[in-house]
Structure formats: structure tokens, C-alpha cells
Image (cartoon, rainbow, N blue to C red):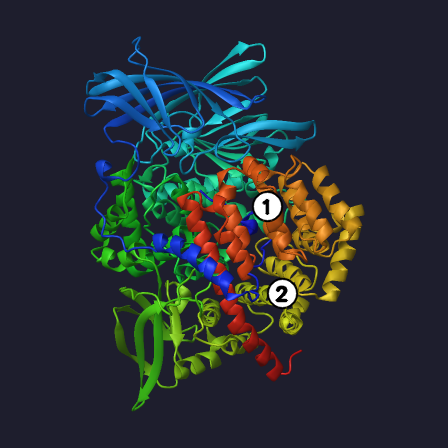
Amino acid sequence: MKRYSLKMITASADDHHPPSVCSRRPRSASVAVLHVATLILTTLLPLRLAAEPLFAFDAMPGKLPKTVVPISYQIELTPDLARLTTAGQETVELELREPTARIVLNAVNIVIAEVTLDDGPERAVVTPDTAAETVALEFAQVLPAGRHRLHLRFQSQINSFDRGLFFVDYPSGQGTRRMISSQLEPADARRIFPCWDEPAFKASFALTVTVPNSFLAVSNMPVASEEPVAPDLKRVSFAPTPKMSTYLFVLSAGELERLTADANGVTVDVVTTAGKSAKGRFALDEAVRLLGYYNDYFGTAYPLPKLDLIAIPGGYGGAMENWGGITFFESRLLFDPAIDSDVMRRDIFSIVAHEMAHQWFGDLVTMGWWDNLWLNEGFASWMQEKAAVQLHPQWNTWLNGYGQKQFAMGLDARRTSHPIQQQVGDESEAMVAFDGITYSKGQALIRMIEAYLGEEPFRAGIRAYMAAHASSNTTTADLWQALEQATGKPVAAVAAPFTEQAGVPLVRAETDCHDGVQQLSLRLDRFAIIPARGFAGLSDAKSLPPVAWKLPVMFGPAAASAAPSEWLLDGVASIAAGSCATPVKVNRGDIGYYRVDYGPHAGAALTSALNQMTPEDRLNMLNDAWAMVAAGRADAAAYLGLVERLAPDDRRAIWDQVISSFATLDHLARGEPAREALRSYARTRLRPVFDRLGWDGTGHGDDDETPLRARLIRVLGDLGDADILTEARARFARFAGDPQSLVPALRDPVVHLVGLTADQDSYETLLRLARASTVTSERVRYYLAAANARDPALAARTLALTLTDEMPVTVVGPVFSTVASSAEQPGLVWRFVQDKFDALSARLGPGFRDQMVPNLMTNFTDEEHALQLAHFKPSQATAGGRISTSRALETIAISADFKARALPTCVAWISEHGVR
């Protein structure tokens, strides 16, 4: 599954959204925050997991007894799209592993009207446990062990938010239409039908659904039969699925159409709302190619007869790997060259590749419990990049996707980090497990392990793993075993420390010369970003506990033409490193998951040799230098000195890293006198890069200059470049009268800047464009541009729209973050959220309380807002909410500390170098 942030929902490559500034507050407020947040943190600090065993069903965590096991479900659903309820009945074939009079299964917001067993007259007593999200079925007599048939009649709800079965109202050429779809990961099948909703309980599902005659219904398997049951209704039955976990069940139904292709006997479809299927051509063609590539790579053929890619025009902002029926937020699947930047093809490919990889990693072979979620998400994240390298090498995917690893390392350096294999106690904790550690640290670890083992031995291990565990569940230990047997290397000894404990390795590297021979000294430590003072609940400890790793280190001469060497670092090492005149680079190729802190001699030599390096190594130098600033191990001068050596024609990824760093500094300086000096310097460094590219180019998605141009326009406008802002407004004025005058590649940055400087007239134009469009990506573009308005009165109007049916629920979270970062009064959003909390919560669901509110607060760094978050009871109502809150409080503290240290050194460096 992919759940999307503002960056992922929008088509443009948004700047990293850093936390904002910190104002001084009386010590009493700080102490109050400290008390509340310390209670949170002491229960959340990650513990190292004991080495886990191979998968065993009885040993898996979860709330449900393992004594009752579902074998198959026969489910009949009749959704009522007017009343937003679903009438249902199901027959579940069970295996009772021991005699019992009590059966416990999951159900949320479901009214169970009747329960019988084995077609007998006796009815069970139903006792719900709302907190546990279970129901107990009590029978008068003890049931014997063996097979039984459990029959239930029930009614469930259709939600406005993406949990269980949800509805989407969307604009069409014939007015507003309504469809339904499902989103069940991690634990929301229980909102549609009573079930054993834990991943280890795999079973077969045979669905029958009654829908309007005009609807196309789509589920995991092909339609087996279809028959009319009323003048305006039909009953659609689907073939039974193979054994699978409940969270992979899917149902989508509406006025839909298909675009179809054949992939070696597998029917591959893109399913869209009426009139949009032609926009699925790119995704369909790529899916056919991916299916062939994955069949070969995994050594196990895709086992279902069909694969649907289903475009949902709202309801949620992500994509979900339901087996045989993947759902996508519409703008992440459909591509229209008339309105979408060609660069969007990269994003669409990445998401399709990610979700299709899940058809093996996650669907065919499923983690036993959510503590091993990384086996699904880390591998799918890695596979999407590997597939892009194979099928679209011109995209330079690993280089341009560097931000994924950097994001993970930023999180992993904190106190509130967690092991990749994290303890998950309940559904709310499972929900917040879908984070940068699970996805991006998992991805980076797999890439590093593949490089350590070799591509072919690694693939042999993956093929063996797939063959051994198809249609079953696993733990990480099963994967290590398969890789060790295939390669003969001690995989667990190297990999397990990365999955079973939190933290980022730090390699401290220095060179020394003796008798003409250079020695490279390496020392393994832990990289940490810790605020200088105990703020918002963090302790005053200045370090994190030491962690041990066995780290594969690639090192060698800095020059791009030189071959690297490998060393398995376990503590300290002193290695002969060639001539004294040769700068030595550690983490050659930027494949390793670790930071490097160079000593004075090695660092000076590498700075001088920066432009002799590969782009990957130059990027690694910049990222590590910036990380040392964030951690307080270096001042900003070291990083800015590297930036000064960059040429305007350097690669997109290099300048993308610089843009992100400048955006961080700009956001931290909001409201500070030093902001204009920082902005002036940033414009001075970035404007030559833009001037080389100019406003107009090919717009081709395979050209890295196209996305770099768009991002430079956006960030230079954000930084107050008057020429850029003037030209953006002029181009938008022409576009309003002639949409063909503005090429799709520039629409996102131009519209963003118009929103940023919007007056009443331009704001109304943005809303008019949003309301007039039936294209999801366009509607998102214009609503988010309107949310950029700095005028507090316009920002208040945008916030009011989040309570109406006009604004899709998918956009509400990004709108809150956009208003908070752009409005002249950032606290406006937080006051609105508090005032309208009940209405927003009803519209947006539990994720609003547990995740959206804490994430919103990372836009602020003053202690007053930290105090308010720490005492905001709704966001601490669940274990998952408490985790999100503690992470947000740490983000606030880190941002405040970064501002206090980095901004003064930046301003001093700029002043010293004569830049204004």
C-alpha cells in the first residue's frame, strides 16, 4: 500500500516541507509539555527485538484465538448508496482446532442480526467488544472440533472516508455521480463483513454483490455469473479467490469502463469512471511489461487469471495492492498529455510497479503479523526502483530518488525511531507503521544487501523464498534463511541488526600518510539528531545508546573512473588506501545505509575533488554534509562550501538536494530578520541554474531538465524572485483565456505561484477552475494552489471549504498543511481544526485524529503549539495517536534546535562571503 503525502498527491515535485521556527516561551510551559510528552515517550522508545523464529501460525501476535480458523467465505453484499449501508450475509467454513462454545472474530460498526451454525436452528448470542473491535459468538452447547459452517446476517456502513467500504461523489459530464470502493489495509475488512481480520488467517473468498444495472462491479477474481434481480438491479458473482488475507479483499462498483490487454494469458485491465479509460493507456502498457518482468524475476508466475488497475476519483490519496484488483487514486494512474506533465509518467510507473510487486511480496507471500510489514512495503519500494532501472534506465531512478533514503535516515536518527521489525500491539499502531522506516529504510537495506550478496545470488534466494512460502505467511527469519541457503553468506549477521534495532550507522573516516602510503581509518558509531535541550518532552540526554552493526562499506578513490573496494566493518579498521595524493571516498556509489563524517584531512581532499566524482558520490557528499549540520556535528559553512563548487549544469539530483536544503532554511527563518539575506543567497545560487534552462524546453518526461525547470520556477517564486513571479502571473493570465498557451510541464509551478500571491480575483479564478474540471489531477492542482494564498482572509475561505462536499476528502489533509506553511497566520489552521474537530473527524475518519492532527502540528515549532498538541486529548486516544504525537513533538524540538544553531552560522557565512 502507498499512502500519500502532499508531495505524492500533487503532480509536481514539491519542496521538502521542513518544520517551522520556534519562539521563546516561559519555562513553565516547557515543563508542562515535558511532563505530558515524557509519559508518551517512555512507553514508545523502541526496544531491540529478540531474534525471531521462522513463521509459525500459533506464535503470531494478534487478538483472535488461533483455535478457530476460517477456510473459506461465501459473502453476499447489497450496498444501498442512498442510505450508505450494506445488507450482507456470509457463510464461513471453519476449522475448530479444539472443542469450544465461543467463537471470536472481528467486526466494527456492524450490526449482526443472526448467527447460526451448520444450518441448525440454534442461534448464537452476540457480544460486541467495541474497544477490541471484536464480537464473541456464544453457543449454548460446546461445539466439537472439526469443520463447521457459520452463517451470519448483518448490516455494515458505507463511509465517507477510506476505511472499509466508502463512497465517492465525483463530477462528470452528466452531473455528480456516486461510486463505492474498499480500502482495508491494515484492519478494515471488519468494517464490511465479520471476519478473522488478521493477516495469518488466510482463506478463500467467494463474493456476490447486488448493484444497479448501470454499474460495473470489480473484485479480486473474474465475474463467474451475472443475472438480473429487479428492473434496476443485478446480482454479480465472482469466482473464488485463492487463499489470501482479509485486507486484500476488494470491491469497487460504479459507472465504470475498461481498457483491456492480454499479458501471456492474463487479462490486464485499467478500470475507470465513464469516459476516462483512454487515459489509462500508459499505465496499461507498463503493467503488461511489468508482469513479464516480475514473472521472470520472482521465478513464480502471477497466479490469478486477471489483474485490474482501478482508478478511484477520490476517497483516498494512495494505492492499494488488493490481489487481482489494485485500487489507485485516479491522478496516480491516469495520464492525459493535454493536461499532465510528461514527468507524471515516472510517478505512475513507480506506483504501478510498487503495487504490482505486492502481488508477490504481500499477496502471494504475506507477513505473519504487522511487525514484519517491511517484508511487504520495503520490498515493493525496492522492486519499483529495480523495475524502473530495467525498463526505463534513462530515468536515473536511484539517483533521482535519493530522497527516499534521506527521509528514512532523518527519521531513524531520532529518539522516536523504531526498528524495521517493530512491535505492533493493535490496529492503530499498525496504521502508523506505514512510515518512512518501514518503506524507505526497508528499501535501502534491501539494496545494500543485494549489493553485498551480488544480484544473481540475491535473486536466487528471493526465488527460493517465493517458491517455499507461496500462499502462506512468513517472518523476516524465513527471508534470511532463504538468502543464506542460496548464497552461503551470513546474511542474518549483517542484515538483522538493521531490522531488529533502530538507528543509523555513522562511519567516522580519516586518512593519514606514512612513508608515501595512505591509511584509511574507519570507526563505526551511531548517527543521531538530538536537540541541545530537553524540549517538548525530550530528555536532556545528549546521545542515544550505542548500537552494533556489521556494515558492508564500499570505499575507494574519489575519481569516477576508479573501482571501489569493499570492507565488512565491525567496530574499527585501518586499511591501506593507495597513494597519499588520492582522495578516498567512503560509501562509493551511495548504496550503503549509513552516514560518513570525514576528518579534516580526508574532508578537505574530498571537497577539492568534488567535481571528479560520479553524480551519486557528489550527491552523497552533499547529503552527508547537510546531515552533519542537522546533527550539530558541523556548522553550515561546510555544506555551503560544497554548494559553492557546484556548476549550474550539474545533474538534477544535485540541485534538487540544494533546493531542499534552501527550502528548509527558508521555512525555519519565517518571521526572522535574517530571512531576506538567506533568500537573497539562495536566489543567487539557483538563478544561474534556471537561466541556463529558461522557461521553455521540450517538456519530455525522459528529460531531467523538465522536472528541474519546474522545481526551480516554483522555489525561486517561493523565495521571492520578482521576475519569476511576474512571468508566472503573466503566463497564468494567458492560460485563463487560452489553456493551450501553458504547457502541461509548467502548469503546476505556475498555478502554485499564482496561488501564493493570490488576490481576490485570482483566488476566485482558481476556485472556478477547480469547480469546472472533472479531472481529479486538475481539481487537486487548483484547490492546493488556492490553499497557498498568503492572505489570511482567503486562507480562512479555503479552510471553510474542507467542511463541504465540494472539496474531496483526499485533498483536506494537504490543504491544511499548505495553508499552515503559506498563510501569514499559520496558527489559523490549528484554531480551525480545534473549533471544527467533531465535524472534521466525522468526515475524515480516525486517521484525522491519530495522524493528520499531529502531522499538521509539525508546521509549528513554538512551545505554545507543542504544549497544545501534548494536551490535545483526541490525538492521544489510541496507541497509534500517541506514537504520532510523540514524533510530532520531537520534530518541533529538532526544528527549534536546528534554527538556533544553523541560521546564525548561515547568515555569518553569507556575510563573510559578501553575498546579500
Query: Is 513 in front, or is 283?
Result: 513
Residue 438 position in % (x across, y down): 39, 51
Q: Amino acid at mark 1?
A: Val
Quarter of the rendering occupied by the N terminus? top left
Occupied quadrant, residue 651: bottom right
Q: Which mark is residue 441?
A: none
Q: Amino acid at mark 2?
A: Arg
Q: Is residue 157 above or below residue 778?
A: above
Q: Secondary structure at mark 2?
A: loop
Q: Residue at x 42, y 40 (%)?
A: 291
Q: Residue at x 26, y 75 (%)?
A: 573
* Residue 683 in the figure: left or right of residue 249: right
Query: Is 207 in front, or is 648?
Result: 207
Alpha-carbon distance for marks 2 and 1? 22 Å
Can see residue 17? Answer: no
* Residue 653 in the figure: left or right of residue 241: right
Residue 134 position in % (x across, y down): 36, 29
Q: Which residue is mark 1?
A: 833
Quarter of the rendering occupied by the C terminus? bottom right
Q: Which residue is mark 2?
A: 670
Can see residue 148? Answer: yes
Dot placed on the residue nearer the N-terminal end, 2 or 1:
2
